[in-house]
Amino acid sequence: MTITSHVAGKVQVVAVSGRVDHASANLLEAALAPFLANCKADGQPLLLDFSQVEYISSVGLRVLMLTAQQAKAQKGQVGVAALTEVVRVVFEVSRFNMVLRVFASVEQGVEALSS
């Protein structure tokens, strides 16, 4: 798994590629921590670009759930964008699209979270 980040407008975009599973979930959690610390009411919204994520396991979903819970507690905004077909199905079956705001594209996510 690789993780890169950039700022688009007012939004911190974190691009994840590869598999988010037992072997990489801790890496994702650690990588998101500094961005999540700034994801609060007066801070920077966080958008996860999943366009290159091949697979996500229940352990990966747990990281996303904890991320969503922390952002909500801090009154921040977090979303995920550009889900691959495999990940989209996992989100729908597990109802994770009810936990995180899901956007069809990074551009749509940036626009929605900027307002």
Image (cartoon, helix red, strand yellow):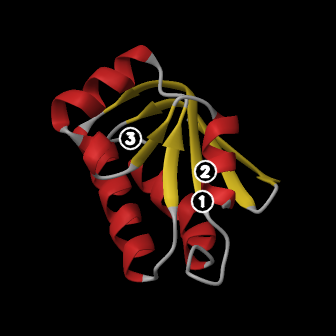
Disc with the residue nearer the chain's start (3 vs 2):
3
The local crowd at label 2, few if under 14, some if 14 to 19, many if 20 or more residues have their Cα within 10 Å, is few
Q: Between 43 and 31, which is closer to the camera in this rendering? A: 43
Q: CA distance from mark 3 to mark 2?
A: 32 Å
- The amino acid pointed to by label 2 is Ala
Residue 73 lies, in percent from the top left, at 37, 81
Query: Image quarter for residue 90?
Result: top left
Residue 16 lies, in percent from the top left, at 59, 38
Residue found 57% across the figure and 78% down from its top: 37
Q: CA distance from mark 3 to mark 1?
A: 23 Å
The local crowd at label 3, few if under 14, some if 14 to 19, many if 20 or more residues have their Cα within 10 Å, is few
The quadrant in which the N terminus is found is top right
Mark 2 residue element: helix
The quadrant in which the C terminus is found is bottom right
Disc with the residue nearer the chain's start (1 vs 2):
1
Left or right? Give the position of 105 relative to 54.
Answer: right
Q: Which disc is residue 46 wearing?
A: 1
Q: Which disc is residue 23 wearing?
A: 3
Residue 19 lies, in percent from the top left, at 45, 29
How many numbered marks, from 0 up? 3
Disc with the residue nearer the chain's start (3 vs 1):
3
- The amino acid pointed to by label 1 is Leu
Q: Are marks 3 and 1 in contact (CB under 8 Å)?
A: no
Query: Image quarter for residue 106?
Result: top right
- Tag in front: 1 or 2: 2
- The amino acid pointed to by label 3 is Ala
Residue 9 lies, in percent from the top left, at 82, 56
Q: Between 78 and 50, which is closer to the camera in this rendering? A: 78
Q: Between 69 and 109, which is closer to the camera in this rendering? A: 109
The residue where tag 2 is placed is 112
Residue found 41% across the figure and 15% down from its top: 85
